[in-house]
Image (tube, rainbow, N blue to C red):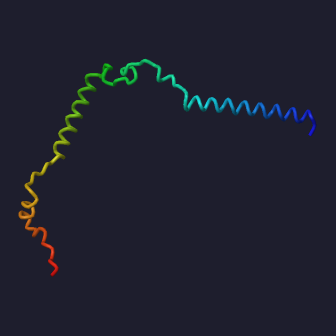
Amino acid sequence: MTDQEKDQLIIELQTRLQAAENQLAWFRKQMFGSKSEKHLKLDADSLQPSLFDQECNIDPEEQARLDKLIAEEEKELENLIVIKEHGPQTDRHLKTGSPGRTSLPTIH
């Protein structure tokens, strides 16, 4: 290997080493450095917009159609929800005629 080839190799390796050191410094800053988000002074309202603060411009006919649809859905839900009332568990098996649990046999 000639002196010129050695010098060229040294320059190439130094360039690669500098690029690797720059990359390592960038990764360290990303992992352990301070973040700009920590220093921002923002109120909570500006971070999360609300859907309900906006005015809704719906055509009155469309609003009436939607109200009717909602009323129909609520009526259908009322018909689907059935709550059964029952007493304690002991009352249930007496009404159904089920013998209930039998006692375990004793070992002598």
80 relative to 16, above or below: below
Q: In the drawing, does residue 19 fall left or right of residue 85?
A: right
Residue depicted at x 14% and y 77%: 106
57 relative to 2, above or below: above
Q: In the drawing, does residue 75 fall left or right of residue 45?
A: left
Q: Residue furthest bottom?
A: 108
Residue depicted at x 16% and y 42%: 78
Q: Position of residue 63 (x, y in %)?
A: 26, 26
Residue depicted at x 84% and y 35%: 9
Q: Position of residue 66 (x, y in %)?
A: 26, 30
Q: In the drawing, does residue 67 fall left or right of residue 9?
A: left
Q: Quarter holding the N terminus?
A: top right
User: Which of the pair 46/28 is nearer the observer?
Assistant: 28
Q: Quarter holding the C terminus?
A: bottom left
Q: Residue furthest right?
A: 2
**Numbered-mark total:** 0
